[in-house]
Image (tube, rainbow, N blue to C red):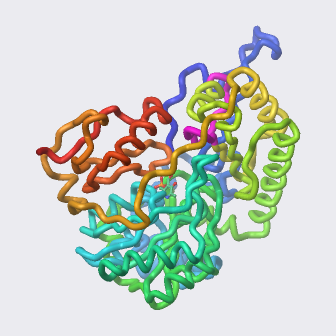
Amino acid sequence: MIRPLLPAALRPRRRLALLPPSLLPPPLLPLHLPAHGRGRGLAPALARLLRQPPGSWDLPELPEFGGPLEAEGAVAEAQARCAALLGAERCWFGVNGASGLLQVALLALAPPGSRVLLPRHLHRSLLHGCLLGQLRPVLFDLPFDATTGLWQPPDAAWLERVLQAALADGPLAAVVLVSPSYHGFAADLPVLAAVVHRAGLPLLVDQAHGRGEALAAGADLVVLSCQKAAGGLAQSAALLAQGCRYRPEAIERALLWLQTSSPSALLLASTEAALLHGASAAGRQRRRRAEAQGLELRQRCQRLGLPVLAGGDPLRLVLHSGALGINGLEADAWLLQRGVIAELPEPTTLTFCLGERPPRQLLRRLPRILRALAAELGGQPLPPADPPPLPLVAEPELELGDAWRRPAEPVPLAAVAGRIAAAPLCPYPPGIPLLIPGERLDPRRVAWLQQQALRWPGQIADTVRVVAA
Ligand SMILES: Cc1ncc(COP(=O)(O)O)c(C=O)c1O
C-alpha cells in the first residue's frame, strides 16, 4: 500500500549541527511496505543495480534483454531460473504489482460470462479483473473473529459447503483463495487445494503477502508481490504456474492485453533479484534473523501486557488495539505523530510490517511507544465487532460491469435499503470491498455498513452510489 505523503515533520531530517542529539527528534520507525524498509532490506543485487549511474538500468526490450512475453533473452532466462528455484513450471514477471498479475490470472482461467468463486476478503484488484474479463464474481463468506474483527481462513469443511452452494447455481470456472492474509495468517493450503481439485476446478492463490508456499500445496496459479514479502521494489511481482489446469497461451494473451508494451527493466530486475535472493542461503539467513527479531518483539510486547496476536507471520506484528480500547486508525494517527509508521490501521487492530531487515531501534523503541499509547489513549476494551450479515455464497443481483457503468446517484446510507450498489465501498488500506457493485442492500446490510462508517472514521462516506432509480 502507499501511505499518504508524510507531513514534513515526519520526513527524515538532516542533522542540525547546532542542536545537541538529545534535542533532535527520534529517527523514524518505518514499519510499512515495501518490506525493504526504505532500502535496508533490498535484495543485494537490486541495491547494487540502483547504485549504477541513474537511468543506466532503464532499458528497452533489446534483443538480448527481451521481456516477459519473449521466448528468448535475459528476461526469459531469469523467468525460467525463478520458476525452477520456486518449484513452478512457468514464471512471468509483472510490472503492475500483484494487482496486474491477479487480473492476468483471472482472465487466463475464466472466459467472459463465466462464474469465479472469490473470498469476501479479496483485494479489490480481483474485482477489477472480473470487470475487465466480464466475469461473474461469486463471493463466499469466511469465518469471522468478532473479538479481533478479522476474517479467518476457511477450513476444508467450510470450503466444501461453499463449493456445494456455489455449484448448485451453475458451473464455476475457477476458485481464488487469499493466503496468507495481510495480517500474515495462513490457510491450510494443501487441504484446501485438494478440496478445489476434487471439484475439478483450477485454484489461483493470491500470495501477495506470501513466498510461493502455495505451489507446494498444489495451487495451479500463484501470484506474488515482491515488495510485500521480499526485498523488491513496489510494483514488481511474479505469476507462477504449474500443472495442466491452465493454458500458458491464455496467460500470455492476458499479459499482452493488460500489461504495458514497455515493461520497466528496473522492475523486471527487481523481481528477479528479490526472488533469487529470497531463495538463496543468504536470503534465507537474513529472513531467519528478521523472524527471530519479530518473535522477540512479540514476546517483549506480551511481557509488557500488550495484546499482540500470535501465530501468524513473525514479520507482521498485529496489535489488537481494540483490547486496549483504541480504534486502530486512532492508534495509527497517534503513532504517526511520534515517527512510528504502521502499515495497516483497522478498527480493532493495527498491523506493522517489520520487513526483511527490521530497523535497528525496533526492539527497544516499539514496545515502549506502544505502552505509552496504551497509557495515553487506552480504556475499556472495544465491544466485539458484529459479523458482516452475508450469506455463505452470493452473486450480485445486477451484473458487475452493468451496475458499475449505469447512471448512478449518491444516496445517504440511512436511506439506501432496497437499492443496488453502483460502486464499491472499500476502505483503503486494506482494499477489501465491504460492498460490491450490483449487490442489493437489505436493511441488515445497511445497518452493518452504518456501523462500519463509525468504525472507519473518514474512510467510508455517509452516502453510497446506487444505480439510479
Ligand atoms: C492480498 C492482496 N492482494 C493483492 C494486493 C495488490 O498488490 P499490489 O499493490 O502490489 O498490486 C494487495 C495489496 O495490498 C493485497 O493485500
Rendered residue at 49%/71% (across/down): 239
Q: Is residue 32 above or below residue 271?
A: above
Is any atom of residue 463 visible in this view?
Answer: yes
User: Which residue range is magenta in the image?
Assistant: 337-350
Does residue 161 appear to the left or right of 213 in the view shown? left
Q: Position of residue 31 (x, y in %)?
A: 66, 41
Q: Nearer the viewer, residue 91 or 427?
A: 427
Q: Position of residue 76 (x, y in %)?
A: 49, 77
Q: Quadrant of residue 80?
A: bottom right
Q: Nearer the viewer, residue 170 or 234?
A: 170
Rendered residue at 62%/62% (across/down): 274
Does residue 345 appear to the left or right of 28 in the view shown? left
Kindly give the residue lying farthest to the top in the view shown.
18
Q: Is residue 213 above or below residue 352?
A: below
Does residue 416 appear to the left or right of 279 in the view shown? left
Q: How many marks?
A: 0
Is any atom of residue 101 visible in this view?
Answer: no
Query: Is-magenta flag for residue 343?
Result: yes
Q: Quadrant of residue 114?
A: bottom left
Quarter holding the C terminus? top left
Q: Is residue 140 above or below residue 302?
A: below
Q: Position of residue 273 (x, y in %)?
A: 62, 63
Query: Is-magenta flag for residue 349?
Result: yes
Q: Nearer the viewer, residue 38 or 200?
A: 200
| SS assignment for the magenta stretch, majority | loop
Q: Position of residue 282 (x, y in %)?
A: 78, 64
Kindly give the residue lying farthest to the front in the view shown.
443
Does residue 443 appear to the left or right of 34 in the view shown? left
Rendered residue at 63%/77% (across/down): 86
